[in-house]
Amino acid sequence: MEAVETIEVDVPVRAAYDQWTQFEEFPRFMDGVESVRQLNDTQLHWIAEIAGVHREWDATIVDQVPDDHIQWRSTSGADNAGTVSFKPLGADRTEVTLALTFEPEGVVEKAGDVLGIVQRRTRGDLENFKEMIEDRGQATGAWRGEV
């Protein structure tokens, strides 16, 4: 299954991208994400609640280009992958697109409207990100390396 959402934020592409590289701050704008621990430049450990189910997984960043995109995939736990991309729309405006792919697990997820839940959550997360970065006006940190 795949969920894709796009939002425009009123900050330069560098600020939007730099904030997204601060993975440990994801719980501030991602509903259901309890924690993200960055183990090194490419390894993350996630703890979240998805469709009412507690999940933990590890993910690897497989492709990362500053001010353009970050792509990851799970290496354990819930089978998922995603890409967030950044497109400048002028000096102080950026289009952010978040695309998530996932495989439902368990009876509850397979029987429920998991795609609808994830789609709504993805939209809400982007709206929360927009509010956070626009209120702040700049990123709380940055990682400018490439993977």
Image (spheres, rainbow, N blue to C red):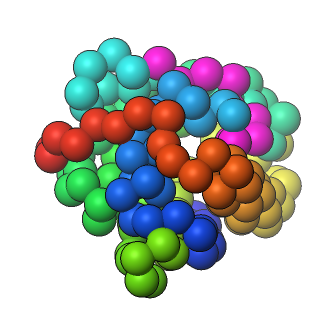
Q: Is residue 15 above or below residue 116?
A: above
Give the residue displayed 28% in from the left and 37% down from the top.
Answer: 143
Give the residue displayed 41% in from the left and 33% down from the top.
Answer: 141
Give the quadrant of residue 6.
bottom right
Q: Is residue 80 above or below residue 120?
A: above
Left or right: 40 with respect to 8? left
Q: Name the residue furthest bottom.
A: 89
Give the quadrant of residue 52.
top right
Tag count = 0
The N terminus: image quadrant: bottom right
Left or right: 73 with respect to 28? left
Residue nearest the viewer, comparing 127 with 10: 10
Left or right: 136 with respect to 81? right
Res 15 seen here: yes
Q: Is residue 109 above or below residue 120?
A: above
Is 32 within the magenta?
yes
Q: Name the residue furthest left.
A: 146
Is 71 within the magenta?
no
Residue nearest the viewer, comparing 112 with 74: 74
Left or right: 110 with respect to 66? right
Q: Position of residue 20 (x, y in %)?
A: 46, 46
**Magenta segment range?**
29-37
Q: Is residue 24 above or below residue 102?
A: above
Res 81 seen here: no
Residue nearest the viewer, comparing 93 with 77: 93
The C terminus: image quadrant: top left
Give the residue displayed 42% in from the left and 83% down from the top.
Answer: 90
Give the residue displayed 33% in from the left and 53% down from the top.
Answer: 70
Q: Position of residue 114 (x, y in %)?
A: 76, 56
Residue nearest the viewer, comparing 10 with 110: 10
Q: Position of residue 46 (x, y in %)?
A: 53, 26
Q: Position of residue 32 (x, y in %)?
A: 75, 35
